[in-house]
Image (spheres, rainbow, N blue to C red):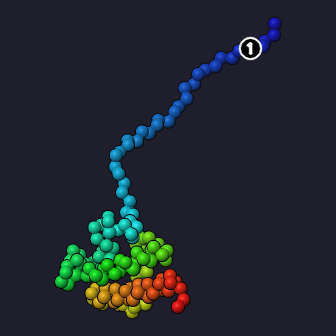
Amino acid sequence: MADTIFRTKVTHETQTTKPIKVTEKTDEVVTANVEPPYTEYATIHNHPFTVDYFQLGDTWQDKYGGFEKEVETIEGYFKRRIQQGELQDETKAVKEHLKKLYKLCSIDKNERVTMQIEKLAAYMEFINKTDDIKFNYKKYGNW
């Protein structure tokens, strides 16, 4: 007979496996510091963005010495620009636009806040009136 081997002895070596790391799940909620859109800022914070920008506090609505009319004018200006598509609906875009308006109206950051607000409100009221004139001219046509 031939010395042929049909079977060989197989040894079962145990495979070494790495232990699986089990991490515990926590119920922590990660809150991101995301600014809301400009048009929804007042509903979330219970006051307009302008109040926070100029740091007016709680007295901005005071009948005697408050800035309710000016804040309303400034807010209306920016909401109108957003509706017309000239500005993005973000507080960051409004801040950038305010920087441009500061240069345009020659407002110094070192001026008193009351002067800054008054100048901005006067300029924005003027722009809103001229926009109304343009709108009516387009609406009713040439005369």
Residue situated furthest top in the rendering: 1
Q: Is residue 7 left or right of residue 37?
A: right
Q: Is residue 61 above or below residue 12?
A: below
User: Residue 110 in the image: x percent, y percent?
Assistant: 31, 89
Q: Residues within 10 Å of mark 1 (few under 14, many from 20)?
A: few
Q: Is residue 55 above or below residue 46?
A: below
Q: Which residue is mark 1?
A: 6
User: Residue 111 in the image: x percent, y percent?
Assistant: 30, 90
Q: Residue at x 32, y 65 (%)?
A: 43
Amino acid type shown at disc 1: Phe
Q: Residue at x 37, y 66 (%)?
A: 40
Q: Is residue 87 above or below residue 112?
A: above
Q: Quadrant location of residue 10?
A: top right
Question: Would residue 104 be seen by someone viewing this image from the given angle?
Answer: yes
Q: Is residue 101 left or right of residue 142?
A: left
Q: Residue at x 32, y 69 (%)?
A: 42
Quadrant into which the N terminus falls: top right
The one nearer the camera, 10 or 125, is: 125
Residue situated furthest bottom in the rendering: 106
Question: Would residue 110 be seen by someone viewing this image from the given angle?
Answer: no
User: Residue 120 in the image: x percent, y percent?
Assistant: 35, 86
Residue situated furthest right in the rendering: 1
Q: Is residue 103 left or right of residue 55?
A: right
Check disc 1 and report its element: helix, strand or loop.
loop
The one nearer the camera, 23 or 92, is: 92
The one nearer the camera, 58 or 108, is: 58
Number of marks in the rendered image: 1
Q: Is residue 63 left or right of residue 135?
A: left
Q: Is residue 23 above or below residue 127?
A: above
User: Residue 82 in the image: x percent, y percent?
Assistant: 45, 74
